[in-house]
Image (spheres, grey):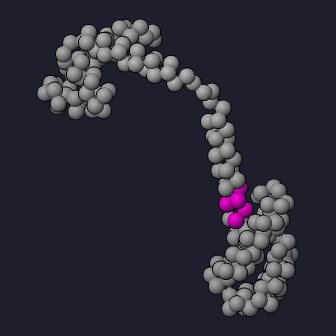
Amino acid sequence: MTQPQRSRPHDPVGHQLQEVMQRVSQGDKDAFSVLYDAVAATVFGLAVKVVRDRAQAEEVAQEAMIDVWRQAARYRPEQGTVMTWVATIAHRRAVDRVRSAQAAANREHATGLRDQVRPFDEAAEEVETRLDSEQVRRCLRGLTELQRRAVTLAYYGGLTYREVAEELRSPLPTIKTRMRDGLIRLRDCMGVTT
């Protein structure tokens, strides 16, 4: 024979926290002290789990409790218990701290990589750039007029194939063919191997 199910007893601690929370929302500092004592260990434990550093967790817990004090009027009992609401605030704070720390580490890493870039000889770099530019100009002169104009408009003017076709008043398939042939000739002229 099965026993009739009993309804769960009313949660006196939860009910008391709701009453305390109501007083906190009205600015009652003594009530906040009671609330703090009731939830601080949970908040700190949750922060330690997320940030994995006790010193950081202490800061996160303190920030979370300040948020609880400031946002107390936003608590709605119909949406969950006081403990759940406080834990949610603490969890968000902890996740924010982890994200902030990760972003800082990423910035430091990127800065470190930039600092490791070997200095280069600016004069040699400029000479090489000029030689490359001169070789490109020389190779462009070896293209047909339509190829040169199409390649120049596309690569130096930033136009799409369709825009190049409109600019040169040529059919799109013709422009695509001229571009392909011109780029092959440029590649061969520049000595680029694929």
Front residue of 93 and 59? 59
Compared to 87, does 96 lie above or below?
above
* Residue at horizontal 73 percent and vertical 71 percent from the top: 64
Location of residue 55 in the rendering, given as x and y in whole percent from the top left corner: 83, 61
Magenta range is 93-98
Q: Quadrant of residue 2?
A: bottom right
* Residue at horizontal 85 percent and vertical 71 percent from the top: 41
* 28 to the left or right of 1: left
* Residue at horizontal 22 percent and vertical 29 percent from the top: 164
Compared to 73, does 173 lie above or below?
above
Can the viewer see residue 9 in this picture? Answer: no
The quadrant of the picture occupied by the N terminus is: bottom right
Callout count = 0
* 22 to the left or right of 150: right
Compared to 186, does 84 lie above or below?
below
Residue sticking out furthest to the left: 169
Front residue of 69 and 15? 69
* 3 to the left or right of 142: right
Residue 96 counted in the magenta span: yes
Q: Quadrant of residue 42?
A: bottom right
Location of residue 125 in the rendering, given as x and y in whole percent from the top left corner: 49, 21
Can the viewer see residue 61 in this picture? Answer: yes
Residue 112 counted in the magenta span: no
Judged by its main secondary structure, the magenta piece is helix
The quadrant of the picture occupied by the C terminus is: top left
* Residue at horizontal 77 percent and vertical 58 percent from the top: 50
Compared to 83, does 109 lie above or below?
above
* 33 to the left or right of 26: right
Front residue of 156 and 8? 156
Location of residue 20 in the rendering, given as x and y in whole percent from the top left corner: 76, 88
Q: Quadrant of residue 100?
A: bottom right
Location of residue 116 in the rendering, given as x and y in whole percent from the top left corner: 66, 32
